[in-house]
Every structure is written in structure tokens, then in C-alpha cells.
Image: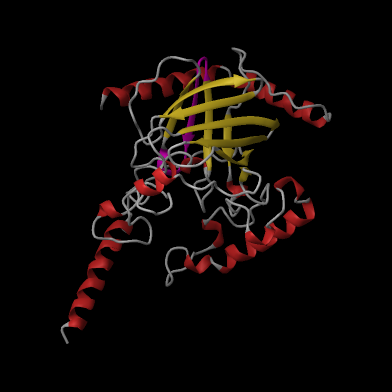
Amino acid sequence: MPRSGIAVGVVVVAIAVTTSAVVSSQEASSRTGAARAATGKPFSASKTPWGDPDLQGGWTNVNENGIPFERPDALAGKQLEAVDDSELAELVRERDQARVAGAAAIGGRDTGAGPVHWYEHYGAKNSRAWMMIDPPDGRIPPQTPAALARLGGRAGGRGGRAGGEGGRADSWLDRSLYDRCITRGLPGSMMPAIYGNAYDITQAPGLVAIRYEMIHETRIIRLDSTPRTGLRSHMGEARGHFEGDTLVVETTGFDPRSAYRNGSPKMKLTERFKPISADKIDWSMTVDDPETWTRPWTFGMTLTADPHQPLFEYACHEGNYAMRNILSAARAEEAASAGGSQK
């Protein structure tokens, strides 16, 4: 194993040992936090034994599935905070109907989605009408002329070569890094999907680790101001600090193959994990990349505590014939087309 892998393993083991030693204290603190929330007073997060706000445990974003990223055209002119509970309930009902109607497309047109209990995204109880918070119009700002030139006039998308999902399939390199079981990147790993929405936050003095169920990536966030290494990776290099109860994480140093929406090397992503109740965290991310967008922009969602949902093994390659079938189907289509053109 590379030395870097050993180092990460040691950190995770150290965090796990620290956590096991203070489980009873955390459980008591959690009950205290719930009691405070019940009194109607402003919520204050419980503390770890070393004094940091306690964000530890199992969390999920399953209820955020189906929330449009940008403000829908049907809600043009509406401000996010102006959508009342009854309007949101109607939007959620319509989204769930759309999920059920589109179920047959999951897994292919012929096989369909299978039993509903295979998936986590049905019946999602969305927290908001759309995810974009700033700009107020709920739309991602325009790309800069430099970005349009760099990307050949196409909008930024998920990492991988130009084909990506639904595109060319000349090679496995034409598929996204997600297709290839390499990474969902950041914030991809934070975003809701049809399954695999669980993740775990574990803390130790000076460190926060976030483990994701899907593809089993782990982020190690150092709570200090030590110089960054300058190395680039799919999840970037994170530094964090607390502002009151809120964990603020600034991440830079992204591998260009997986940089969010094809951002530039100067991209900085700033997350805020703000506890708002004993079982809810308001999570937001600000994207700041002056070489790609004309201004910074922010989106967010709600994380919900789910202590009964441990992270399952995500054996992405085991028994997975998707890549082989995608490529073989493309070759079969080419052969059929060539045969037809010769007649």
C-alpha cells in the first residue's frame, strides 16, 4: 500500500478508537441537545469531550432527492424563502409522482426499476423548493469567456472525458469517473442519489472524517491552518474550523479530471455544516472560481440524522457488467450500422 494510504488508514483508526472511548458521553450529549430543541430555545450543539461542537454520527440526504438544483421556470420570480409549506407539499407530491412514473427507466428500458424497496428515493420529504441559494434568482451565474474558451463552448459537467453518461463509448475512458467506480468527487459525494445516501461523520481532536457509502470515499479534514501540500486529488485538500457551532470547510487542490463542473485549478469550495436541531444539519456550499464563473454562487440542502443506517459495503466492481455491456453494445451498434451500409 502507498504510504499515503497507510497514513489515511492510521488517521481513520485513530479517530475510531477515540470515538469508541467517548460513545456514552456523546449519547448523553445528544439527549441534552434534543431536550434543548424541545424547549423552543435557540439550538446549541452538544460538545465533544475536547470541546468541539459534536456533529458525529450517521447522516443521510435521502429526503433531498428530486429537489431541482436551480429554480424551476414554473417558479420564475419566486424567492426561495417565499415558498410556503403548502406550496412545497404540492411540489413534493408532484416530484414523487414523477419518480414513480419514471421508475421503468432505472436499470434500462426493458428491465425496469425492480421492487420499490430496492431504492431509497421514493417518498422523499424535500426540505426546499430548489437548492440554489445565491444568486437570489436561483440560477448558476454565467461562465466567463475564459471558461467557455477552455471548455470549447460547452457547459461544465461531471468529470471524465467528453462523452460522459449517455455519450460516446469508444473506450472506458469515455465514461465518467463515477461510471468507472473511481469517484463521485466533491460535492458529488454529498449529493442525493437513488441509493447509497448514507454517510458518517467522525471527529477526533483536530480532525473530522466524513465517510461516504457510495464508492466508499473518505475525506480527512484537518482543523488547523497548516500549509497545504499543493497535491491535487479527486476530493481536493480540505482545511476546516468552527465558527460557533458551524463547521466551515474550505477545499482546494482538485484533480482537473474531477473538478466540479469542470472548474479551473483556482476553484475553492466552502462548505458550512450548521446544526439546526438535534437531528438536522443545514449544509451549504459556495463555489468560488473566478476563472470559470462570473461570481461565486451557493447552494444547499438539509442533512438528517439516521443512526440506524450504517454504511453498507459498496462493491462497485463486483458482479458489475455495466462497463463491459456499455462498450459491447456500442460495438454491436457499429457492426450493425456497417452491415446495413454495405447492402
Q: Residue furthest left?
A: 342
Quarter-of-image position of residue 68: bottom right
* Residue 163 versus residue 293 in the image, above or below: below
Answer left or right for 31 relative to 312. Answer: right
The image's colouring method is secondary structure
Q: Residue at x 41, y 34 (%)?
A: 235
At 38% from the left edge and 62% from the top edge, which residue is drawn? 166
Q: Which residues are magenta?
A: 204-216
In the depicted structure, whether residue 211 falls above or below residue 179: above
Quadrant of the snapshot with the N terminus:
top left
- 171 over 134 or under it: above or below: below
Quadrant of the rendering where the C terminus is positioned:
bottom left
Residue 226 x %, y %: 43, 14
Which quarter of the figure has residue 298?
top right
Q: Locate residue 60, reporting x and y percent.
A: 58, 41
In the depicted view, which residue is nearer to us: 145 or 12?
Answer: 145
Is residue 333 shown left or right of residue 124? left
- Where does the image place residue 156, in percent across and percent down from the top left? 43, 49
Q: Residue at x 58, y 62 (%)?
A: 99
Seen from the viewer's position, the closer of residues 92 and 236 is 236
- In this view, which residue lies farthest toward the right? 39
Q: Is residue 206 above or below residue 338?
A: above
For the point 40% across and 45% down, the residue is 147
